[in-house]
Amino acid sequence: MKLSMSMLAWYMRDYHPICSVKNDMVSIGGIRFLTGDSMVLSPDYLYLGTADHFFADPKFQGVYVAVHCQSFLLFYDCEYDALLNMILSAIDFYEKWELMLGTAAAEHAPLQRFMELTEQVMDDFMVVCNLETELLASTQVKPEDIKGTTWEYFFENKKVSQMSLNSVILDGEGKQIQKKRHLEPYITKSAHPNICDKINMFLYQDKEAVAYLSVNQNACSHTEMEMQLLPVIAGYILMASEFTSCKSFTRSSVRFFADLINGIEPEEGLLKYYQEKIAVPLFRIVYFINKRRSDVIYLRTFLKFLRSHNVICCEYKNGIAALFDDSNGAAPAAKELIAISGFSGLCCGVSVSSGDFLAIGRQIRQAVFVTEQVGCKEGVFCCEDYAFRYMLNVLLQDESVPFLLHPAIEKLYNYDRINQSELLFTLKLYLDNNKNLQKTLEALNIHRSTLKYRIQRIEDIIGLNLGNTEDEEYLRLSVWMKFYDESEFPVG
């Protein structure tokens, strides 16, 4: 990993009496040797040599110096070979430390394991809390850490005091920060003299804050180094089991959504927690796919675009599944986002509306079904526009179904065939328009008295009163099924 002079100074704190660390950067990737002929120092290297090549003052004769950009460490009464070995050892130490972090992350180890590894490079007490300030894990407590009302409250209640979170927030240069949920570490400085400064950093998963780190600055001697290390530690900590397990409350809404999409049913308490967190009373699942472009770069670029517009989404099969608020219409919202994105060739399948998170697994199948029905052609398509026709097709593939149609269908069909009339077609339009005479007249383009005569004739033939027939739904479905394949049954 890249080192900084603060990190190197911490590792070699027993070997150098003087150091000046200014505008420190995490960029040291190796060692070069300092000579009088080369004073152009690259930020990618630490330079080691005798101080008289760096300082003009003769008092630095026989003193060794390690230089990085504007920072330096001085070493007196030290053998050059021993010093070089010590610096190489420091580089090796941090590399092995990060490798152990990476191994723990790959194994999704418990958060406490990460705390044990953190103790190897940080002297100050550190805690990880959820957004409700409840303790998730901490490093070992030293006696000097237990001072001040903040930590007394913490050790008693296993929860961080809200008072400490409302303190003045400063960045690494001492400038006040107004926005709390910041991507970088920041310093909180309390107005109370018996409360230590702290370094805080929110942990973001899928651009959503899920927890935060807090480091007690008991001596404030390692603030610079800890400000540099926290982002590294945070990146690995987010792979702990507490942030990846499907039973965890400290995951992003995206991770919870992805579990539902993949059929993982949450526990009741977890379901209630995320329903309140996401707070969308009515929603549809939208599936985006581009038949011509299914490469990872294309998918993740569009995924990033959706998340930048606060859409909860994840990769699914060869496309992207997304949750859209249906309060004002999910389909128009999806269409508008596609237009804004500039992505062409997208086929967008929209599920039916629901307010039940446990229905999300069924909704994604509906959304995928729509894209299959339209052959993945470009556009936005809703499930309800294709589901009924598909269901009829499935029914009609069963050879027994035509024999189960309402008996009125066969009577009207035979009557029309013999008399060259359109009574069955008239019945279809009448039912399609929910028995509204005016709409049926407009569809047929006939006189009102003609329509009334046809309806009366239909009732006489089938022996039913269309105004209050108890099996209307049976009759309606039978008519739809009879007219499903209009090429076999010419009408009008």
Image (cartoon, rainbow, N blue to C red):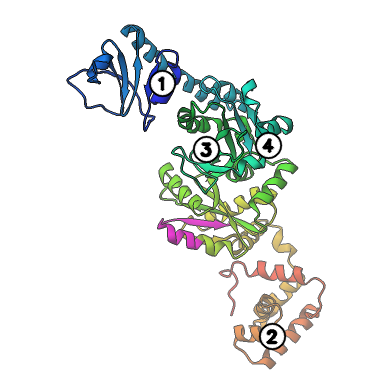
Is 55 situated above or below 235? above
**Position of residue 75 in the picture relative to residue 183 (left or right):** left
Residues marked 3 and 1 touching at CB (< 8 Å): no
Q: How crowded is mark 4: few (under 14 residues within 10 Å), some or many (20 or more)?
A: some
Question: What segment is highlighted magenta in the picture?
Answer: 335-350
Measured Cα–Cα span from mark 2 to mark 1? 88 Å
Q: Which marked residue is nearer to the observer: mark 2 or mark 4?
A: 4
Residue pointed to by mark 1: 8
Residue pointed to by mark 2: 437
Would you say residue 338 sits in the magenta stretch? yes
Looking at the image, tell me whether mark 2 or mark 1 is earlier in sequence order.
Answer: 1
Residues marked 2 and 4 touching at CB (< 8 Å): no
Q: How crowded is mark 3: few (under 14 residues within 10 Å), some or many (20 or more)?
A: many
Residue pointed to by mark 3: 187
**Position of residue 180 in the picture relative to residue 1 (left or right):** right
Measured Cα–Cα span from mark 2 to mark 4? 66 Å
Q: How crowded is mark 1: few (under 14 residues within 10 Å), some or many (20 or more)?
A: some
Please say whether residue 131 is visible from this viewpoint: no
Would you say residue 419 sits in the magenta stretch? no
Q: In which quarter of the image is residue 242?
A: top right
Measured Cα–Cα span from mark 4 to mark 1? 34 Å
Give the residue type at disc 4: Glu
- Identified at 70% across, 53% down, the residue is 356
Q: Residue 418's spot in the image, x, y percent?
A: 67, 80
Q: Residues within 10 Å of mark 2 (few under 14, many from 20)?
A: some
Measured Cα–Cα span from mark 3 to mark 2? 74 Å
Residue pointed to by mark 4: 134
